[in-house]
Image (tube, rainbow, N blue to C red):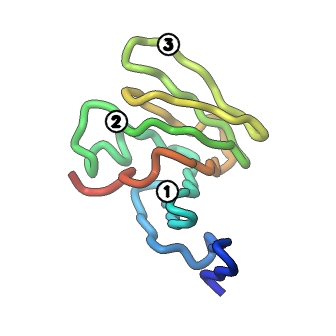
Amino acid sequence: MATRATKGMERKSFSSPDERRPFDKGSLEVVNVGGSTIGRGTFQPGFKWSECVKPIAKTHSCEARHLGYMVSGRMKIVMDDGSEMEVAPGEAAFIPAGHDAWVVGKEPCVFIDFSGFAEYAKKA
């Protein structure tokens, strides 16, 4: 069951998302629950935002801010100012707008985002 609400509670499954957005070397499932948008991004090895999503977003860098949890894989983030970090499985991360990001290694990267995937990979 995709949606189940009882006395104000609500749940949804990423297996039946409200929206799916495929992009080169990845995809995004979005659920709207409790008045919030939550996304699960799956990024395959070889994914790089500036090559795979930039053609969709048509911005210099990723303008979404992300607050999320890395389920699997690793991702390197480089901000427009040159600062950088790598996010690993089991880590929570905040990433401000204005960055590029790419998968590190040969394992797909799965990231649950609680703030930035509402508009991610949507045509400008």
Question: What is the CA distance from the residue labelled 1 to the residue labelled 2?
Answer: 18 Å
Residue at numbered disc 2: 63
Residue 83's disc is 3
Could you say whether the residue bearing mark 1 is in a helix, strand or loop? strand
Rate crowding at label 3 as few (under 14), some (14 to 19) or many (20 or more) other CA atoms within 10 Å: few
Label number found at residue 76? none
Q: Is the residue marked by circle 2 packed among few (<14), some (14-19), or many (20+) residues within 10 Å? A: some
Q: Which mark is residue 26?
A: 1
Q: Horizontally, is 110 left or right of 37 in the view?
A: right
CB of mark 1 within 8 Å of CB of mark 2? no
Label 1 amino acid? Gly
- Which tag, 3 or 2, sits closer to the chain's start? 2
Location of residue 21 in the rendering, given as x and y in whole percent from the top left corner:
41, 65
In this rendering, would 75 be left or right of 24?
Answer: right
Callout 3 amino acid: Ser
* Percent position of residue 57, x then y: 27, 47
- In percent of width and height, residue 42 lies at 57, 55
Quarter-of-image position of residue 7: bottom right
